[in-house]
Image (tube, helix red, strand yellow):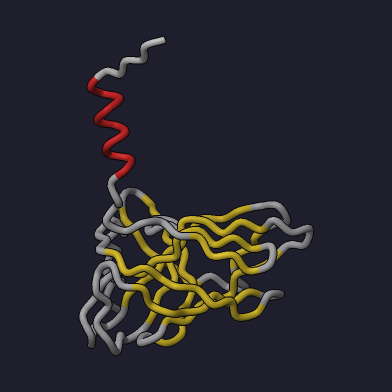
C-alpha cells in the first residue's frame, strides 16, 4: 500500500512540529486544572499590569470560587469584570469572587475578566515565567507560574467623566 500526502498536509505537519513562541501550559492542584495562566509584559516601574487565565476547570464535586491572585514583583491582584456598552469599555471590581461550579469551567480573557496587579517592581519580559498564586475560597493559595506575554487585545477603557 502506498501513501501519499499533498503539500497542505506536509505544511500542516511541519507547522505543528515547530514550537510556538509561548507554549500553553497547565497546572493542576487537586481537582482544579488551571490552563495557561499568563501576565502582560511590562517594564519595571509600570503603574500596573493584568493577568488572564485561558481556563480554570473544576473536576470536583464541590463548587469553588476564585477570590484573587498574587504575582512576584507586583503584589496582590484584584479581579475585574470588563464591560462593553455601545462600543465603549469600562470595568468593575468583582465582589465575592468568580464561581467555578462543580464539574464546571470559567475563562478569564482580556475582554471578559482580568486579574489586575498594582505597581510592577521588576521587568516582566516576554517568554519568562513569574511565580504567583491564585487564591480560592476552599483550596486556598494555589501556586502557579504566569507566562509573560505581549498582549494588546485588552479593550481600551473610556476615561471616567470629570466631575
Q: In what quadrant of the picture does the C terminus appear?
A: bottom left
Q: Residue furthest front?
A: 1
Residue 63 lies, in percent from the top left, at 73, 62
* 108 sits to left or right of 162: right
Q: In what quadrant of the picture does the N terminus appear?
A: top left
Residue 95 lies, in percent from the top left, at 58, 73
Query: Which image quarter: residue 50?
Result: bottom left
Residue drawn at point x = 23 percent, y = 87 percent: 45
Residue 140 or residue 81, whichever sits in front: 140
Residue drawn at point x = 37 percent, y = 63 percent: 90
* 6 sits to left or right of 129: left
Residue 20 or residue 31, whichever sits in front: 20
Residue 86 lies, in percent from the top left, at 34, 48
Query: Which image quarter: residue 11?
Result: top left
Residue drawn at point x = 63 percent, y = 74 percent: 136
Residue 56 lies, in percent from the top left, at 56, 59
Badge count = 0
Compared to residue 143, the image places residue 109 above or below, namely above
Residue 81 or residue 128, whichever sits in front: 128
Residue 146 or residue 21, whichever sits in front: 21
Residue drawn at point x = 39 percent, y = 54 percent: 84
Q: Residue furthest top?
A: 1
Compared to residue 160, the image places residue 100 above or below, namely above
Amino acid at each position: 500500500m502506498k501513501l501519499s500526502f499533498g503539500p497542505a498536509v506536509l505544511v500542516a505537519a511541519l507547522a505543528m512540529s515547530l514550537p510556538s513562541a509561548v507554549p500553553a501550559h497547565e497546572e493542576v492542584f487537586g481537582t482544579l486544572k488551571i490552563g495557561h495562566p499568563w501576565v502582560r509584559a511590562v517594564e519595571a516601574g509600570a503603574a500596573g499590569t493584568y493577568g488572564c487565565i485561558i481556563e480554570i476547570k473544576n473536576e470536583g464535586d464541590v463548587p469553588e470560587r476564585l477570590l484573587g491572585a498574587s504575582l512576584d514583583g507586583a503584589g496582590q491582584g484584584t479581579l475585574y469584570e470588563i464591560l462593553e456598552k455601545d462600543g465603549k469599555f469600562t470595568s468593575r471590581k468583582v465582589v465575592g469572587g468568580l464561581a467555578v461550579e462543580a464539574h464546571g469551567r470559567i475563562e478569564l480573557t482580556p475582554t471578559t475578566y482580568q486579574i489586575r496587579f498594582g505597581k510592577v517592581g521588576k521587568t516582566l519580559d516576554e517568554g519568562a515565567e513569574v511565580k504567583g498564586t491564585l487564591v480560592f475560597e476552599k483550596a486556598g493559595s494555589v501556586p502557579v507560574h504566569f507566562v509573560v506575554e505581549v498582549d494588546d487585545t485588552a479593550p481600551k477603557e473610556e476615561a471616567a467623566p470629570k466631575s
